[in-house]
Image: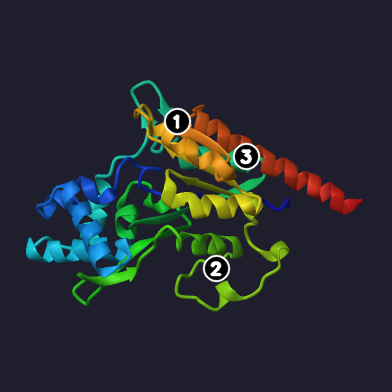
Amino acid sequence: MTKMIPLAIVYDFDGTLAPGNMQERDFIPAIGMTTSQFWEQVSAESKKHQADNILVYMKLMLDKANSEKVQVREKDFKNYGKNLSLFDGVLPYHTNDQSEKGWFDRINIYGKESGIKIEHFIVSSGVREMIQGTPIGKKFSAIYASSFFYDHHGIAKWPALAINYTTKTQYLFRINKGCLDVSDNTEINRYVPDSERKVPFSNMIYIGDGETDIPCFRLVNDRGGYSVAVYKPKKKGARNKLCKLAEGGRIDFLAPADYCNNSKLDKIIKSIIDKVQTDNYLNEFRGRE
């Protein structure tokens, strides 16, 4: 039996698979704030205390939920995730006369036909439990995102994990080595030769939407992988803003966040899959000489 070639597609979430920030749709209105009020307070508190803004936003979520008597159990966050909008093509498309598979199933099938086993991962500063609650929550081999500790009543009490734009890169190494357990600080730091790592960086694609993804874009690029920046389709100025990321080789490709079949993004990812397949075969032939 021919061994499948491993390939990892790693996604940011907010602005990449879903428009906007996940807290803004239902949670922030539930705690009696506007989006601008919430993020302005996060910014002010971060500056005042010289604190990480991810930890600050998580603390503010709990503080405001407590004062407004809003439930913050794990299942409540997952319920907020159920209502999140996703970009076109991410989910299966159904009408009376046609049915099209969603992004993950289509890409997995395309990879399999090329002898490639594709795994999908999330690395996000958003709330893990909300992402788990979305219709695509089970499509990922691992979801690395900010999350909470829950007490014996199942109520969120404190941040358990906060992921900011620089700490995101740690999780790319976890995927690379196949060490997916966040609590394991031994295996992730153990030296493993590149040839023995589960997913070579050359077989990794990182998809993000902005400046907070630059460390991941750069790491994947520098180690032979592929970086793709996406922007909200039809949003004025969105593409031009991201063009700056191409300076200095920080991104390889730029496309609208349109995950439909035959979209520009779809063609880019399939072309990368084809290249990974070709490169792998060529390396095998070289090894036989």
Q: Circle 1 is placed at which residue position?
A: 260
Give the number of the mark in front: 3 or 1: 3
Q: Residue at x 20, y 61 (%)?
A: 61
Q: Circle 2 is placed at which residue position?
A: 179
Residue 145 visible at all:
yes
Up/down of 260 relative to 40, above or below: above
Specify which label sits upstream in the sequence, 3 or 1. 1
In the shown orientation, is residue 136 left or right of residue 219?
left
Q: Circle 3 is placed at which residue position?
A: 272
Q: Amino acid at mark 1?
A: Cys
Distance (Cα) linking label 2 and label 1 = 32 Å
Q: Are marks 2 and 3 in contact (CB under 8 Å)?
A: no
Specify which label sits upstream in the sequence, 2 or 3. 2
Q: Residue at x 45, y 61 (%)?
A: 166
Q: Amino acid at mark 3?
A: Ile
Q: Residue at x 29, y 69 (%)?
A: 159
Residue 113 visible at all:
no
Distance (Cα) linking label 2 and label 3 = 24 Å
Q: Position of residue 10 (x, y in %)?
A: 50, 51
Q: Nearer the viewer, residue 248 or 231?
A: 248
Residue projecting furthest to the top: 97
Label 2: state its secondary structure. Answer: loop
Q: Position of residue 56 (x, y in %)?
A: 26, 64
